Image (tube, rainbow, N blue to C red):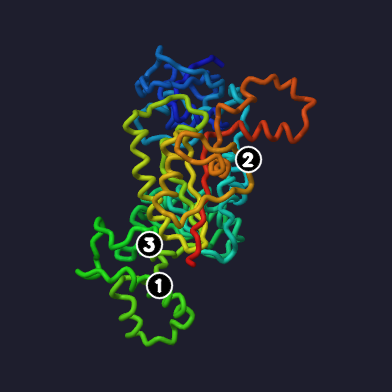
Amino acid sequence: MQRCEAIVGAQCGNAVLRGAHVYAPGIVSASKFMKAGDVVSVYSDIEGKCKKGAKEFDGIKIFLGNGISERSRSEIFGGLSELKGIGIRMTEPVYLSPSFDNVLPNYLFLQNLPSALVTHVLSPQPGEKILDMCAAPGGKTTHIAARMRDQGEVIALDKISHKVEKIKQNALLLGLKSIQAFCFDATKALAHGMVDTEEGFPGGPRKDNPSSCSSQPPSPVWNWNLQHALQILDSYILWLPSQLLLRVYRPCSLHLHREPPFLPASFDRILLDAPCSGMGQRPNLACTWTLKEVTSYQPLQRKLLTVAAQLLKPGGVLVYSTCTVTLAENEEQVAWALATFPHLQLQPQEPRVGGEGMVGAGLSPEQLQQLQRFDPSAALLQNVDTGALRGAQEEDMIALANKDCIGFFIAKFVRCKST
């Protein structure tokens, strides 16, 4: 066997560091004589400058480990239909993270520690109606359904169709029947003309979503009362004459609101795992963000928070989370939400694994203690001699390991009940 070299993209490199093998579509370059069975040294092109199909690359690259090629260069770059499956099976990765590919797929779903913690903070209960506003690929959605013992209703939204299919596939794979996934923009999940007019929430119909039911949208207060009437009538709906049923529902296109958009105060709990700059993700071999991209997320997150605040029932729980470390997308959003929606109150979180929030957004010390922030720079194990830890207590080892995770942020709100 002869030793060859292969170059993969930054995303593929990240996956290899997390325990994955190299899949054929991720290979950007390979030695001209590489064939199946050869020992291959795998590198990541962190600047994205390697040309597809190149035979050698002298740019900046990072060594990921060694593996055995399962495809020849001619198979990978032969111009035929794109190959799928493993291209290089990693045998000596620089980071010994086990691969869980196809390990009990009907029972296991891998998540980062903070991502799994989010559902515990949300604390969904059997029989409740839960909304996961930005749900793909479905890790938190399926975890919510599992925590509810698959009893109740979990609505999952995402505006990209193939991601919605992934949510459905994961739900099917795990045998969860309480999940309904819809391809829908969560910023429009509040039914038009159905805006909550309770003090502390914006009133009036949405101007950016004109009525598709009538030229004159119904009164928001009328719809608010109708919602509660429908909840009472829901058990007796079979007794209503069909003509009356049409007269009640058709003017507002309610259709019992089993699918988006939804009436105000429709959900017991809402998870908003918001789109973000993703600057907490680890490992990350390349930083491709621009300042414009990083700052573009705050307005979107506020649109989503506005919808979530109105879809939440009085007494309901809203959990806001991101996988980034910026103040603008985390603590500043909490301060904005508390100022904009007086009926939302910050709540303590259980369990607590992360640290408190970051100062700088005007939140009080007590409020900062109610947040959970996971800071990758606090991962002390990066510079610790593991041999020196052999005599450490188990709880100390767990505490150290819990800090060695992605950057993440969690805030928990409750909507106060009307008095």
Instruction: State the CA–CA distance, disc 3 to disc 1.
Output: 15 Å
- Residue 99 at least partly seen: yes
- Residue 115 at least partly seen: no
Q: Read off the residue under disc 3.
A: 260
Q: Label 3 amino acid?
A: Pro
Query: Dot 3, crowdedness within 10 Å: few (<14), some or many (≥20)?
Result: some
Viewer-side label of 3, 1: 1
Query: Dot 2, crowdedness within 10 Å: few (<14), some or many (≥20)?
Result: some
- In terms of secondary structure, where does tag 1 sit? helix
305 to 21, vertically: above or below: below
Give how far across and how far down residue 309 sits, in percent.
Answer: 42, 56
Along the line of sight, the residue nearer the viewer: 340 or 328? 340
Along the line of sight, the residue nearer the viewer: 89 or 184? 184
Instruction: State the CA–CA distance, disc 2 to disc 1.
Output: 39 Å
The tally of labels here is: 3
Q: Read off the residue under disc 2.
A: 353
Give how far across and how far down residue 120 sits, in percent.
Answer: 60, 50
11 to 243, vertically: above or below: above
Along the line of sight, the residue nearer the viewer: 266 or 71? 266
Q: Return the mark for residue 227.
A: 1
Give how far across and how far down residue 25 sits, in percent.
Answer: 42, 32
Along the line of sight, the residue nearer the viewer: 45 or 257? 257
- In terms of secondary structure, where does tag 2 sit? loop
Name the residue located 28 percent from the left edge and 74 percent from the top edge.
251
Q: Is residue 299 left or right of residue 335?
A: left
Q: Label 1 amino acid?
A: Gln
